[in-house]
Image: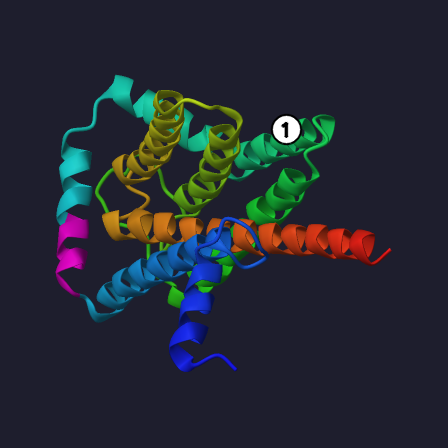
Amino acid sequence: MLNPVSRLHRFVAARFSPEGETGLHFTIGVALILLAALAFGEIAEDVVEGDKITLIDVQLAHWFRERATAGFTELMLFITHWNGIAGSSVMGVLLAAWFWYRKAHYWLVVVLAAVPGGMLLNLALKNIFQRARPSLEDPLLTLSTYSFPSGHTAAATVFYGLLACYLVRRVRTWPARAAIVAACVAMVMLVALSRMYLGVHYLSDVLAAAAEGAAWLAVCITAISTLHRRRIARARGQEVSA
């Protein structure tokens, strides 16, 4: 019979083992989920209570509007429309088709769960918080839906985050991996910037959306990866017993 210290040691060792159904991948996934959810909760609490971040929100919204230029506005409109519901759906379908073509069934299930699921989650959160859009004179873009959290930013976080996870697994060198992550993070930041610049979201909207998207993506990847590993483990067990 193992003593409590030995049990704890075995439990911790199992959680940080690269192998197993609930090993290192599961531990990292749960940690990311908790951190992202905590970040979202802190931002949401500040918005609901009208803390300092809401003052920064208004100041930044007016700062962007006062410095808007025609050329930059066109660029921001292109980015924001490309990463809207239609654009994100098209990119999601194309990525799913690529995974199907490559017979990457695990990644196919992830994209089918993460992209539409993330959109539905964001819609639910918008209706829970019901925050009004920024109110500006002569706005660059006008929308009647709720503001918190940003749907565009959440969708970009899920899509480009998923793309980064897949590509990082495909390359071997750390410089290439760093470049992939940097490019995907830059795309999410550009989408978030476009929403703030166009005056349809506050800073807290896009920060909360990034946390929301990261948490949801971590849930999808962790859950499906764990189920995939469990299926492999059971198959191996049946081969051994046979």
Residue depicted at x 41% and y 80%: 4
Residue 141 against residue 98 in the figure, above or below? below
Q: Where is residue 61 in the image (x, y as percent from the top left)?
A: 20, 43
Residue 139 picture quarter: top left
Q: Position of residue 30 (x, y in %)?
A: 44, 59
Q: Where is residue 106 in the image (x, y as percent from the top left)?
A: 66, 42
Query: What coloring was used for the rendering?
Result: rainbow
Direction from residue 233 to residue 69 in the image, left or right: left
Residue farthest along the top direction in this orientation: 71
The type of residue carrying mark 1 is Leu
Residue 219 against residue 139 in the figure, above or below? below
Per the picture, the main secondary structure of the magenta-coloured stretch is helix
Direction from residue 88 to residue 36 in the image, left or right: left
Q: Quadrant of the C terminus?
A: bottom right
Q: Nearer the viewer, residue 185 or 201?
A: 185
Residue depicted at x 26% and y 60%: 43
Q: Nearer the viewer, residue 189 or 228?
A: 228
Residue holding disc 1 = 94
Residue farthest along the right direction in this orientation: 242
What's drawn in magenta, residue-wise? 51-58
